[in-house]
Image: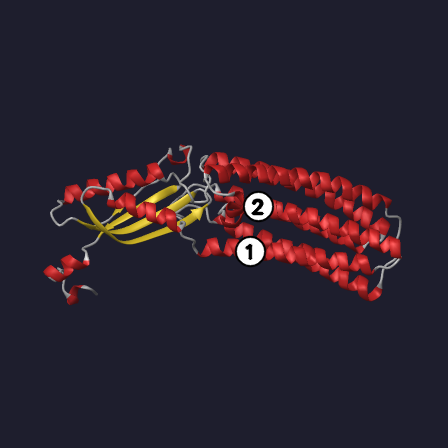
Amino acid sequence: MGAASAEPDDLGDSPAAAPGTGTPGGGPGADRGESTFTVLVAAGANLGIAVAKAVAGIISGSSAMLSEAAHSVADTVTELLLLTALRRSAHPADEAHPLGYAAARYVWALLASVATFVGGAVFAIYDGVHTLAVGEELGNPTLSYAVLGIAFLLEGFSLRTGIRQMRGEARRARTPLRHYLRHTPDTTVKAVVMEDSAALVGLVLAAGGLTGAHLTRSPVFDGVASLLIGLLLVYVAWVLGRSNVELLLGRPLPAPVREAIHAELLAVDQVHSVLELTTLMQGPDEALAAAKIDFRDTATAAEIEWACERAERRLRERFPQIRRVYLDPTPGAGQRRREGLDPWGDEGVG
């Protein structure tokens, strides 16, 4: 016998997140809307910057500027993929996908990290190697400096928007910002923050390469800057790809939260012990909890059913991000030894 939950309509309305979960507590709708705004700001900034960098790179002949243009194009494509991730993951559960579409966010975010690698890193590294091997014809750098300055302001504003959202989510999760950034299941905002941070570093590298090339009249500085930008994007793509793969494979809730869930189950009347507990993050604001429960031998079937209901309610009240609870009444090892409990015998197992 097992007790399985249905999704409650008001689950995402709780104002607090479970401590240490690394999930936002403002509700799925609020979090998704805030994430969408953050991604839209980043996409708008990168689209305009990409065009300006490309024009400046062609006029100045700077490979670092062209690498930065490719970087911004890759970021724009990334943001479009992240917007798709947010839209696809918003679909409610249906018969074809009974556990919902939350994991779709990680599929599209993984594709976004691939776009960062292919569209930005590969081009930047190739352009840097080509510049070092063949050289380049340097033009007027004035426009490039102007574009870099404007881009720095726009990227800084986009990064500020992403960090502001991250801070709010970390505060609700009662987690330090650095720890939250590293472990957050909201990989769309994590992608924006990391890519904008990389963009600011890339702008500094491009400015350094451009300045060095024009002061020395040597393209080496520009080529090296382009290579460094490419390596920076490889790192960002690797970190984001690893995070999304980990979540796609299935990441449990943090150990302190699992311990708290275990304690909540034991606090329910008629529960003797928790034999097995499995948790799974299904999305930034969705998690699943399943447990094998050894109920007291004196409990009736009705008492076990109501104990399952109480356990489910306790978990959802304390951990709003737990959207599904599955409890399986299972005889414990002591009862099996005392009674040799297996009512069907070996023949009934098949």
Marks 2 and 1, the one that precedes in the sequence = 2
Residue 143: percent from the left, percent from the top?
Answer: 84, 44
Front of the two marks 2 and 1: 1
Q: Amino acid at mark 2?
A: Leu
Residue at position x 60%, y 45% in the image? 193
Secondary structure, mark 1, is: helix
Q: Is residue 195 visible?
A: yes
Please count the marks in the image: 2
Residue 197: percent from the left, percent from the top?
Answer: 65, 47
Q: In the displayed structure, would residue 234 be above or below residue 142?
A: below
Residue 183: percent from the left, percent from the top?
Answer: 49, 49
Q: Residues within 10 Å of mark 2 (few under 14, many from 20)?
A: many
Q: Quadrant of residue 308?
A: top left
Q: Quadrant of residue 315?
A: top left
The structure's colour scheme is secondary structure
Q: Amino acid at mark 1?
A: Gly
Residue at position x 66%, y 56% in the image? 232
Secondary structure, mark 2, is: helix
Residue at position x 73%, y 43% in the image? 49
Q: Which mark is residue 115?
A: none
Q: Which residue is mark 2?
A: 82
Choose between 78 and 146: the one closer to the eye. Answer: 146
Q: Is residue 69 visible?
A: no
CB within 8 Å, label 2 to label 1: no
Q: Is residue 194 left or right of residue 180?
A: right
Q: Which residue is mark 1?
A: 241
Q: In the displayed structure, would residue 6 be above or below residue 110?
A: above
Residue 306: percent from the left, percent from the top?
Answer: 20, 40
Image quadrant where one finds the C terminus: bottom left
Q: Residues within 10 Å of mark 1 (few under 14, many from 20)?
A: many
Residue at position x 48%, y 41% in the image? 90
